[in-house]
Image: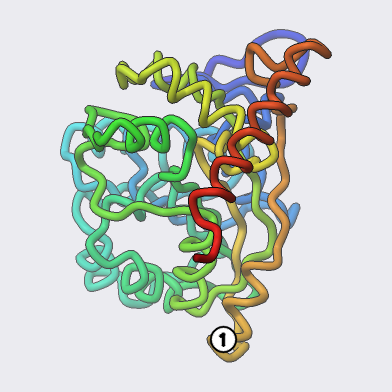
Amino acid sequence: MVAAVRDGGAPTIEYDALIDLANRNNSHTLLHELATVSGKPGLRILEVGCSSGYLGASLMAKGHHVTGVEPDPGSARVASGVLAQVWNGGLDDYFAAHPDARFDVLIFGDVLEHMLDPVAELRRALAHLAPGGHVAISLPNVAHGSVRAMMLSGRFDYHDRGILDRTHLRFFTRGSIAQMLADAGLALDCMFQVSVPVDAVGTEYAMALDRELVTAVELLSDNDPSGHAFQYVLLARPSTLPHAALVQANDAVPVEITAPLRAPRGSRSVWDRLKVALFRRLLKSISARRFRAR
């Protein structure tokens, strides 16, 4: 499998997926960026759950040494053609067979949500992180507006892919990510949000969302960027801070939005914005009457 780099503009490297290094509203691009943030050549990188190796291959093309761990035999076989080394099996098996392995970068790209105990897996991998090394992670956001709209209709339907992928064992929000990192002894260095509109996710993953509920979620969360966050992508480093201080520090790290958030349809004109403001005021008035102290 050979990389295809487009002529002109920013380089794009194509394997089973297309990694457009100019598009920062994309988890693969951000993982590539965060993995190489040190600017050092020849990094030793471990990609956990490397799939067919398309992300690792883009890093190999930049001169880095990528080892992949992949439990699926077919994907591991493909990845072995583009990565320096591929282990077909689990992370614990790999480290048992390679107890002296050391890496400058650990990548967990949309992997931790598939694990029974992501904190234990992070701790296991951190034991093999070289001094000064870091971890790059991407995770889906279960607080995305599409899931909020679905739950308002009393549903939590699994799908073959996406945020509610039926193989996901754990679900994360911005806050629970900060907690998980602290539990693993990791300090959050920076965090990015991959933004996808609520209606676009609902359509792409055939979530059969009620249009009125989508509208309500969009209008009520347009001041809450997490409602548009499809994924969070982050860089973290080992820390010796006490656990409570680490949770607080991780919570305080701002989330960078890499693409402008689109105003929901029906709230773009002056008249539409006025109607939204009136809708919110009416909702607050009703809520105040319902929950006022008796």
Q: Where is residue 206 in the image (x, y as percent from the top left)?
A: 31, 16
Looking at the rendered structure, the secondary structure element under dot 1 is helix
Can residue 215 be seen at all in this image of the molecule?
Answer: yes
Looking at the picture, does residue 210 appear above or below residue 88?
above
**What's the residue at 40%, 20% (across, down)?**
202
The residue lying toward the viewer, choosing from 41 and 278, is 278
| Outermost residue, front side | 294
Q: Name the residue under label 1.
A: 244
Can residue 32 be seen at all in this image of the molecule?
Answer: no
Q: Where is residue 179 in the image (x, y as percent from the top left)?
A: 49, 70
**What's the residue at 62%, 53% (across, down)?**
42
**In the image, 27: left or right of 190?**
left
Q: How many marks?
A: 1
Q: Position of residue 70 (x, y in %)?
A: 27, 46
Looking at the picture, does residue 57 appear above or below residue 41?
above
The residue lying toward the viewer, choosing from 181 and 37, is 181
| Image quadrant where one finds the N terminus | top left
**What's the residue at 57%, 76% (across, down)?**
247
Q: Position of residue 224 (x, y in %)?
A: 64, 42
The residue lying toward the viewer, choosing from 164 and 198, is 198
Dividing the picture into quarters, in which one does residue 54 lie?
A: top left
**Would you call the spot at circle 1 few (<14 residues within 10 Å), some (14-19), or many (20 or more)?**
few
